[in-house]
Image (tube, rainbow, N blue to C red):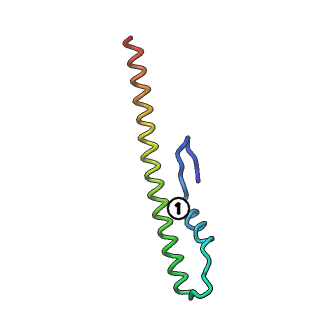
């Protein structure tokens, strides 16, 4: 995970592997079922983090655009006073 001036970015593979590490095989679960469950969990984690990162990037860019607009408005306001 990295922070770039308040923007959060999560590495999808690292996150997915961390999720898998906490998901142990159940005592009555056969290997095939466990592997399918792990694969499903891995793929869902990857997709979820990718969605999160895209949303975070979009929100960060919108926030920066809003700040830029506010600064420009203040500059224009002061110039014409």
Residue farthest along the left direction in this orientation: 80
Q: Quadrant of the image for the C terminus?
A: top left
- At 48% from the left and 70% from the top, the residue drawn is 43
**Horizontal placement of 14 versus 48: left or right?**
right
- At 53% from the left and 52% from the top, the residue drawn is 9
Q: Dot 1: few (<14), some (14–19), or many (≥20) neighbours within 10 Å?
A: many
- The x, y position of residue 57, in whole percent, is 46, 48
- Considering depth in this image, is 34 or 72 the residue closer to the camera? 34
- The x, y position of residue 16, in whole percent, is 55, 66
Height in image: 54 above or below 29? above
Quadrant of res 59: top left
Residue farthest along the top direction in this orientation: 81
- The x, y position of residue 32, in whole percent, is 53, 86
Count the marks: how many?
1
- At 47% from the left and 68% from the top, the residue drawn is 44
Q: Secondary structure at mark 1?
A: helix
- At 44% from the left and 53% from the top, the residue drawn is 54
Circle 1 residue: 12
Height in image: 51 above or below 67? below
Q: Quadrant of the image for the N terminus?
A: bottom right
């Amino acid at each position: 995970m990295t922070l770039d001036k308040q923007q959060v970015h999560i590495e999808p593979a690292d996150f997915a592997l961390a999720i898998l590490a906490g998901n142990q095989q159940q005592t009555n679960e056969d290997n095939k079922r466990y592997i399918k469950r792990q694969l499903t969990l891995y793929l869902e984690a990857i997709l979820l983090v990718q969605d999160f990162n895209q949303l975070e990037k979009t929100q960060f860019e919108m926030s920066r655009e809003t700040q830029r607009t506010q600064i420009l408005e203040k500059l224009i306001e002061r110039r014409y006073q």
